[in-house]
Amino acid sequence: MKKVFRYIPALVLALIFSLTLSAEVTAQERGWTECETYEYIRRDSALFLDVYRPSAPRADKAAVMTLFGGGFAIGERNSRLMKESAQALVERGFTVISIDYRLGLKDSAVVASHKRLLKVPDLFRYCIDIAVEDCAAAVSWVCANSGMLDIDPSRLILTGSSAGAITVLQLDYCRANSLEEASALPEGWKPAAVVPYSGGVMCRDRELKYATDPAPTMLMHGMKDKIVSYRSFGLPFMGKIHGGKKMDKALNRQDIPHWFIRFDGIGHEVANWLPGSIDLFCTFADLTLSGRVTTLDATMTDSDLIPTRWTNMSMLEMYGARKRRR
């Protein structure tokens, strides 16, 4: 174990996000909606999901599944950010499902088998693949229990932050390309929409493309994001994670309508932006759920998106890959 990624302690300390900060007061004390918790699948251990029900549900019974961020190493479905996001969405009438998924970088045996930097893309692919498998299983559980949840599964929107954003984008990419990682999805099911905050798609092919149309997608990405690169990150022939700019280019190349909102001068702060962008989220959702096909390409600023030290790190800096191995 001498050469096992020495950066993991640094990852846990420096990484990531305000996502994992716990609130000092309970949801009830804040006046937030309480959740119901269900086990949706058992892997090596049980994986759970939290369901937040609105007091005034939308007439169309639309729902949102949310995935936390944390670099596939840390994060919780019931972190403060996830609760804030759920509250913002339930106040707009959405039923919200916040899910667990396996964190590949918490598994020391897996990390130990990827000792060299050249193995990093393989490790990331593993982390993304198991997260996608779990997300697909959660969708399957939600669809099977849609009556109990009082939702329309055809109106289920997927959203996520950072690693969660990568996962929901990757799930839809795998679904559209009939890849094994999405095989647990109900036959014929397609997300009503996908809304990633600082996400991307991992692709081994020379060119990112979709065999069938992806779900309506609103990409949001900081142009200075180096954690989940605005452009792409990876090594030739070993797979790259294509960020917002590369995804926008790929979707335009196939004439696939989508929204692309970039933030000039902003890094990874966008990953935490769902509560602050609830009006924009709902505008996109309402248009999409009503069947309208729209396209938007915009550069935005928001004074609430304040750069910090961690949001301007590179992925390599964040994971400590530049540290000398013993």
Image (tube, helix red, strand yellow):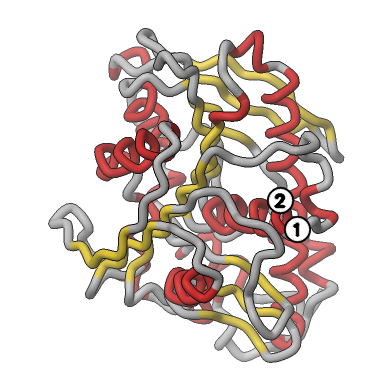
- Residue 132 is marked as 2
- Closer to us: 268 or 262: 262
Q: Is residue 94 above or below residue 160?
A: above
Q: Is residue 26 above or below residue 289?
A: above
Going by the numbered disc 2, the residue's amino acid type is: Val
At 43% from the left edge and 61% from the top edge, which residue is drawn? 198
Image location (x, y in percent) of residue 113: 85, 73
Residue that mark 1 sits on:
129
* Label 2: how many Cα within 10 Å (few below 14, some 14–19, many 20+): many
- Closer to us: 123 or 20: 123
At 82% from the left edge and 40% from the top edge, which residue is drawn? 184
Identify the image quadrant of the C terminus. bottom right
Q: Is residue 242 above or below residue 128?
A: below
Classify residue 152 by image quadrant.
Answer: top right
Drawn side of residue 227 relative to residue 259, left or right? right
Q: In the displayed image of the protein, which residue is found farthest to the left?
A: 303
Identify the image quadrant of the N terminus. bottom right
Drawn side of residue 51 relative to residue 104, left or right? left
At 77% from the left edge and 39% from the top edge, which residue is drawn? 185
- Closer to us: 205 or 162: 205
Drawn side of residue 306 relative to residue 241, left or right? left
Image location (x, y in percent) of residue 271: 39, 56
* Label 1: how many Cα within 10 Å (few below 14, some 14–19, many 20+): many
